[in-house]
Image (spheres, rainbow, N blue to C red):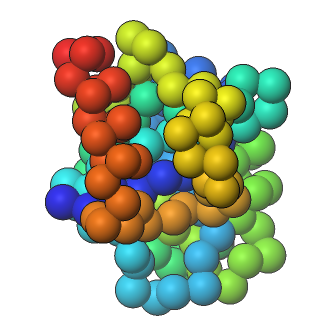
Amino acid sequence: MTTFLMPIKPKFAYRIFTGVKKYDLRKTWESTPIVKRGDRVILYVSGRVKAFMGEYIVGDVLVGSPEYIIRLLSRNPASGVGEEDFEYIRGSPLALAMEITNPLVYVKPIELKCVLRILPDFNPPLKLQKLDEYEPILVMLFDKVRLSSI
């Protein structure tokens, strides 16, 4: 299992954590996705929140033209995605749709200011970012918060 950090707007994070949103859509330029079934995505909630609030496990991964992804997910009202999501991927060469499974809200979110006290050079992710397995402090932080949330 690979772990990724991903930024997300507060309203979309809320939809994930309440179970409304079943797919997360991303712009991509890669025809072979970097994420795969079973990968862990840690959500950095941007805006005024500025905290790592939770995570999910990736289910199905779909890659194709934005039109293909929109057509596929539009047929499934239970996907939890709509026009605002579709607008985000329009115009991209390719689009990535990650099925959201096992969403988990951290009991104690990790605020960016706390991470910066430990790692002053840390920058929050601007896009889907693979977490380097050789950054044990980051992995320890997230694993500790995850275990306290179960």
Residue 74: tell me if it is visible.
Answer: no
Please identify the quadrant where the C terminus is shown. Answer: top left
Please identify the quadrant where the N terminus is shown. Answer: bottom left
Tell me residue 80's x, y (percent): 52, 34
- Specify whether 29 is left or right of 17: right
Q: Is residue 71 above or below residue 80?
A: below
- How many callouts does the rendering have? 0
- The residue shown at (51%, 26%) is 110
Residue situated furthest top in the rendering: 107
Q: Quadrant of residue 121?
A: bottom right
- The residue shown at (48%, 52%) is 5
- The residue shown at (45%, 75%) is 63
Tell me residue 21's x, y (percent): 50, 33
Tell me residue 61's x, y (percent): 35, 64
Q: Is residue 101 above or below residue 41?
A: above
Q: Quadrant of residue 102?
A: top left
Q: Name the residue nearer the viewer: 12 or 149.
A: 149
Q: Is residue 71 above or below residue 50?
A: below
Residue 114: tell me if it is visible.
Answer: yes
- The residue shown at (39%, 76%) is 34
Tell me residue 131's x, y (percent): 40, 61
- Specify whether 22 is left or right of 29: left
Q: Quadrant of residue 89?
A: bottom right
Q: Is residue 74 above or below residue 49?
A: below
